[in-house]
């Protein structure tokens, strides 16, 4: 039987190996993985990750129009290639 997994807090994201990818809509640049450990250090492991609530700022242009995408765990040893 499969049990639904509730991934709610920053700590959950880290525990389940989830990744956050962010990119700036204002300036073209590479997608960057958000450092969850650093984020947890700043906001706390119990910080609830409510969609659309996480506000990031682009370090290049200072824009707050940053899109965030939750990425499932990447299998280690699979070559690391993105298939999209
Ligand atoms: Zn930017």
Image: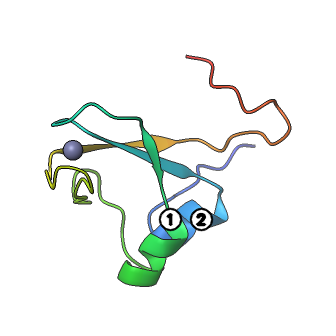
Rendered location of residue 55, percent (x, y): 22, 60
Residue 72 or residue 25, whichever sits in front: 25
Rendered location of residue 12, percent (x, y): 55, 66
Name the quadrant where ligand 1 sits: top left
Rendered location of residue 73, percent (x, y): 65, 44
Q: How many marks?
A: 2
The answer to whether mark 1 and mark 2 are in CB contact below 8 A is yes
| Residue under label 2 | 14
Question: What residue is at 75 percent from the left and 43 percent from the top?
Answer: 1
**Is the distance from the Cβ of mark 2 to the nearest ligand 1 atom less than 8 Å?**
no
Q: Is residue 30 left or right of residue 53?
A: right
Q: What is the C-alpha distance between the residues marked 1 and 2?
A: 7 Å
Question: What residue is at 81 percent from the left and 42 percent from the top?
Answer: 76
Q: Is residue 83 left or right of residue 76?
A: left
SS label for mark 1: helix
SS label for mark 2: helix
Residue 79 or residue 53, whichever sits in front: 79
Residue 70 or residue 56, whichever sits in front: 56
Which of the two discs, 1 and 2, labels the residue nearer the N terminus? 2
List the single residue furthest toward the right: 77
Q: Is residue 53 left or right of residue 1?
A: left
Question: What residue is at 65 percent from the left and 56 percent from the top?
Answer: 17
Whether residue 17 is visible here, answered yes or no, is: yes
List the single residue furthest toward the front: 60
Whether residue 44 is visible here, answered yes or no, is: no
Q: Quadrant of the C terminus?
A: top right
In front: mark 1 or mark 2?
1
Which of the 4 quarters of the picture holds residue 31? Answer: top left
Which of the 4 quarters of the picture holds residue 16? Answer: bottom right
Residue neighbourhood size for the residue with mark 1, other residues' Cα within 10 Å, grouped as few (<14), some (14–19), many (≥20): some
Rendered location of residue 72, percent (x, y): 59, 41
| Residue under label 1 | 36
């Amino acid at each position: 039987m499969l049990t639904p997994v509730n991934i709610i807090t920053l700590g959950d994201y880290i525990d389940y190996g989830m990744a956050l990818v962010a990119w700036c809509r204002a300036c073209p640049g590479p997608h960057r993985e958000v450092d969850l450990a650093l984020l947890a250090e700043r906001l706390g492991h119990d910080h609830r990750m409510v969609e659309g609530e996480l506000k990031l700022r682009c370090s290049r242009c200072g824009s707050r129009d940053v899109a965030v995408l939750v990425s499932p765990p990447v299998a280690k040893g699979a070559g690391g290639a993105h298939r999209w």
